[in-house]
């Protein structure tokens, strides 16, 4: 359970960093600010969606493994 909390905390720190980058890119006069701003907005949307998709696939894959383990445990009790 601690691993999930650490990963979640790292995700929060990463997203906060993206929000800060977005704010800085919007307020500066750097000639590359538009690229930074668009990249930050894109990453703010895409990265959490990818994390969600990876976790969903992981749960679906390991749900099968858990069912197989439960069946083997039932066989051993007989």
Image: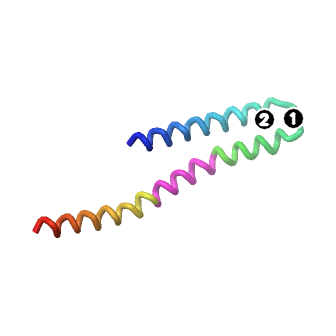
Q: Residues within 10 Å of mark 2 (few under 14, many from 20)?
A: many
Q: In this picture, which residue range is highlighted in magenta?
A: 45-57
- Of residues 6 and 37, which is closer to you in this image? 6
Which colour scheme appears in the figure?
rainbow
Tell me if residue 54 comes above or below residue 1 in the rendering: below
Q: Residues within 10 Å of mark 1 (few under 14, many from 20)?
A: few
SS of the residue under disc 1: loop
Q: Give the residue at x 20% y 64%.
A: 73
Q: Is residue 51 left or right of residue 28?
A: left
- Say what secondary structure mark 2 lies in: helix
Q: Are marks 2 and 1 in contact (CB under 8 Å)?
A: yes
Q: Where residue 51 sits: x, y (%)?
A: 54, 51
The quadrant holding residue 22 is top right
Q: What residue appears at the point 55 percent right and 41 percent down from the top-left corner?
A: 11
**Which one is nearer the viewer's eye here, 67 or 36?**
67
**How far across and down, in percent of the image, does residue 59 sit?**
41, 58
Relative to 27, does residue 72 appear above or below in the rendering? below
- Expressed as whole percent of the image width and height from the top left, the position of residue 53 reads 52, 56
**Residue at the limit of the structure toward the left, as seen here:** 78
Query: Is residue 38 magenta-colored?
Result: no
What residue did someone put label 2 on? 25
Q: Quadrant of the N terminus?
A: top left
Q: Is residue 65 above or below residue 52?
A: below
């Amino acid at each position: 359970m601690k691993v999930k909390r650490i990963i979640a905390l790292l995700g929060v720190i990463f997203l906060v960093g993206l929000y800060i980058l977005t704010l800085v890119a919007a307020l500066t006069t750097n000639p590359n600010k538009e690229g930074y701003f668009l990249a930050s907005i894109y990453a703010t949307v895409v990265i959490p969606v990818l994390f969600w998709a990876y976790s969903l696939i992981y749960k679906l894959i390991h749900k099968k493994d858990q069912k197989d383990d439960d069946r083997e445990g039932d066989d051993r009790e007989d």
